[in-house]
Structure formats: C-alpha cells, structure tokens
Amino acid sequence: MGNQFVFRKGIATEDAIFKLTNEILNALNNKTMIGSIFCDLEKAFDSVNHDILLSKPPYYGIRGKAKLLVESYLQNRYQRVQIINSYINANTVSEWTKIRHGVLKGSILGPLLFLVYINDLPKAIEHKAVPILFADDTSILITSPNNIQFQNDLNTVFGQLNEWFKANLLFLNFDKTDLIQFTNKITCTSDIQITYDDKHICTAIETKFLGLFINNNLYWKTHIECIMSKLNSACYTMW
C-alpha cells in the first residue's frame, strides 16, 4: 500500500501532498514534462462490489477464518426504506433488498475494506506513472521527455486507468476529472487531448488537492488568499 496515504498508521495528508509536489519539482528540475490527472470517482464507497472485494483478500494473506469473518460482515445483509408521514399518520415501507454493493465510509472496517478493494490499481499503471491514492481521491502523475511522448503516455495511462475502473465496477466522473500540466519558466504547455470511449477530460490550470489549492506553476496565491479570507472571518467573529 505504498501509494496509499490514508487509514495507515504514521501516514497523513501532508505525506501525500509532499509526494505530489516533490515529484513535480524533481521533474521540472530535470527539464522533463509532467502532468497529473486528478480523478473524481462517483460514489466510490457505495460502488464497491462485494463479490469482487471478497476475491481480493487472499492476495494479501487474508485466508481461512479471517476471510470468513470478512465474508460474514458483507454477505446476507438486507435493507429497506421506511417513509413516515406524520401529517396523515401513515408509514410506507419498501421491500427488503439484498445489499450487493458498498462499504460504510464511517465505520471502522469499511475504510480498510475499501483500501483492499483499490490497492491493486497502481499495478495497472505503475510502469508508466506515479499514482497517489488518498482513499477514493486518485491522482496520477505522468512524466515524459517530449510533447509527443507526453500525449501518448497520458492517453495510455488514462486508458489503463479506465479499464481498471471498468473491471472493478467503479465509475469516473469525466466532468470533474482534470488534467494539469505543470510548468516553470523554462517549460511550456502544449495542446493535449485525453479521451476514452469518446469522452474527454478538461485541461485545468488549478484544482483542489486534499484541501490544498494547487496550480500549474506551483504558486500558492489562491491557497493563501483562501486561508486569509477564513482568518479574516474568524478574527471578525472573535472581535
């Protein structure tokens, strides 16, 4: 789980941010092109397929009684919806439905099971890119020596990423997924098109990464202004 930066002892948000910025600065110092795909997954925790999830624990040494315990936690669970209308003193109840997807994000075991579910994602792309995972927040860094190779590598990695999502029944929100190409005074941006199944993602100059506003030049003006605004509001409230 070396690419995962959440729900692990001694690992925090700062480590993920440092990993991202350090990789970007190293690439820029080496005069290579670098960009990051910031993925947005639709209802990732709710989309976890139980059958797929239960096929993965043996690869991490979870077998025997331990695996049976995980199975008992997930299998043979049902849910229904009850609507109480106090105005007419009536209740409406749906039929019981078996739960086949989802792990509880706010539970103790749910986040750990999600890590098991997504942990093999880096293996699908690691030879081409550097993945940084923070639970369902997935960012992929790609470096290349020139424009042509950069475009090819971005599309290759994005294709591999989507194939993994499709195989694991997770869904990428293309409208909220961004590509940022990082530059400095020496490097320049290029016109890049990234597509998959006739869908494309937008190129942005700024995004929010784990609470940090990050732009294509690694300037922190937006983030500083955001913090100053919050501090001004807090000071005004205390005053």
Image: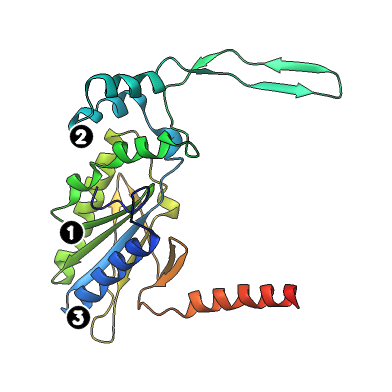
Mark 3: which amino acid? Asn
Residue at x-position 18% and y-position 45%? 123
Secondary structure under badge 1?
helix
Secondary structure under badge 2?
helix
Residue at x-position 30% and y-position 70%? 21
Q: Where is residue 89 in the image (x, y as percent from the top left)?
A: 84, 18
Mark 1: which amino acid? Asp
**Residue sitting nearer the eye, 160 or 224:** 224
Residue at x-position 52% and y-position 16%? 97
Residue 170 seen in render = no
Disc 1 or 3, which lies upstream in sequence? 3
**Residue sitting nearer the eye, 154 or 212:** 212
Residue on which disc 1 sits = 153
Query: Mark 3: few, some, or many residues within 10 Å (few <14, many ≥20)?
Result: few
**Residue sitting nearer the eye, 157 or 75:** 75
- Above/below status of 81 relative to 26: above
Residue on which disc 2 sits = 60
Residue on which disc 3 sits = 29
